[in-house]
Image: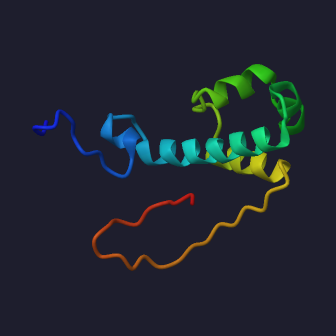
Amino acid sequence: MTRKGYEAGGRNVFEDIGVPNAEEHLIKAKLVFKIDTILKRRGLKQTGAAELLGVRQPDISKMLRGEFRQFSVERLLRFLVALNQDVEIIVKPHRDRHNAPALHVP
């Protein structure tokens, strides 16, 4: 602890608190945030979202509350496509000498 009573965190809060598979969890959290933003912008309720995405309403509820372990990254990407979003995956050589290669969701 610092004198200010807090510690500076890293790039990934899930890693900071010791969540297993922290990088994957962060990617999923960012994808769910994008899904939630789209649902809110469209005024879609959970039942309508569930029908559109082909899942049950309780699963949508859990996902939006942060319980998304049951969904793979691929499935979350498919949800974005179902919400009429283009998803691009770009693979390029890593050039940053100060940080390890990583997955990013802008």
As drawn, the residue found furthest toward the left would be 3
Relative placement, left or right, of 31 versus 4 is: right
Q: In the figure, residue 9 lies in which quadrant? A: top left
Q: Position of residue 63 (x, y in %)?
A: 65, 30
Pick the residue in front: 93 or 62.
Answer: 62
Q: In the figure, residue 58 lies in which quadrant? A: top right
Relative placement, left or right, of 84 versus 104 is: right
Q: Residue at x 83, y 48 (%)?
A: 83
Relative placement, left or right, of 25 versus 83 is: left
Q: Residue at x 29, y 76 (%)?
A: 97
Counting every numbered tag in the picture gives 0
Looking at the image, residue 93 lies above or below residue 43: below
Q: Position of residue 42 (x, y in %)?
A: 84, 42
Where does the N terminus fall, quadrant-wise?
top left
Looking at the image, residue 7 lies above or below residue 60: below
As drawn, the residue found furthest toward the front would be 4
Q: Position of residue 20 (x, y in %)?
A: 40, 36
Colour mapping: rainbow
As drawn, the residue found furthest toward the top would be 58
Pick the residue in front: 8 or 21.
Answer: 8
Pick the residue in front: 28 or 43.
Answer: 43
Where does the C terminus fall, quadrant-wise?
bottom right
Relative placement, left or right, of 71 versus 11 is: right
Q: Residue at x 57, y 47 (%)?
A: 30
